[in-house]
Amino acid sequence: MKKQILSLTTIALLSLSVLNTGCKKTASDTTKPVITIVGSNPYYIQKSTIWSDPGATASDDVDGTIVASPSGVVTTGTTGPCTITYTAKDKAGNTATATRTVNVVDVDGYYANVVDESPYPTGTLSNYNETMHLVADGSGKVNLTTFGDYVNGSVYFNLTSPSTLTVPSQTVVCGNPAASRTFSGTGTVSTSAPQVVISFSEVTNGTTINSQDRYTR
């Protein structure tokens, strides 16, 4: 009789253990991965150059580091925006996407017929050679070898869109006689000419001059 009671007790304990185990629930994974785009977004690239995707990284709160796969095509033969989409999927099936806009622009190279338009101090027009170069980091920064009728004045501007730009305030020692000159301004980029027009102010020894440079290739 005692043996039977012990057996029943053991069975009861085992049943309770199974019941308790069966009641445990595993929390479901419903969180999407997080995608981080590497490099500039939007990204600016000069027309007719080779596109090299900086890529993207992805992390998941459960799976850790996972792959972010790109899709889309960047055609640099023509100007205009292109889109790259990055997709990441964790083991639970949660999917995340992120997009990068790649703007193909045409600003590089030799520009002629640069016009310093009135109200420049003398109101004269002058033509000189100008080289613009888009920095190859995707940021939209463009270096100018000369600016404001000063052949030894190197200035840069930033593309704020494929058709607009800004000249951040920057001081350059240039001119004859040489002096510290502070430039700032805004402008536009036309793909039809191509043509770049910059309206700017120049501050030299406390005196401000407003002018406009028009660059036509």
Image (tube, rainbow, N blue to C red):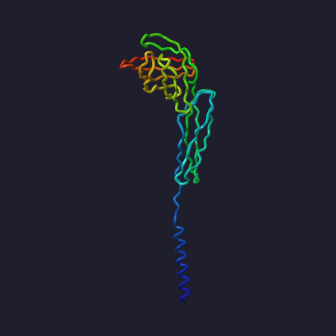
Image coordinates of residue 106 in percent, x first then y, are: 58, 25
Tell which residue pokes out farthest to the left in this image: 206
Q: Camera-side residue: 17 or 146?
A: 146
Image coordinates of residue 87 in percent, x first then y, are: 58, 44
> Going 57% across and 27% down the picture, which residue do you hit?
105
> Going 58% across and 22% down the picture, which residue do you hit?
109
> Going 44% across and 23% down the picture, which residue do you hit?
172
Q: Camera-side residue: 191 or 176?
A: 176
Question: Is residue 140 placed above or below 85 in the rendered structure?
Answer: above
Q: Is the C terminus in the top left, top right, bottom left or bottom right quadrant?
A: top right
Q: Would you identify the image quadrant in which residue 170 lies?
A: top left
Q: Camera-side residue: 77 or 123?
A: 123
Image coordinates of residue 102 in percent, x first then y, are: 57, 33
Q: Is the N terminus in the top left, top right, bottom left or bottom right quadrant?
A: bottom right
Question: Is residue 15 placed above or below 140 in the rendered structure?
Answer: below
Question: Is residue 112 placed above or below 17 in the rendered structure?
Answer: above
Question: Is residue 198 placed above or below 72 in the rendered structure?
Answer: above
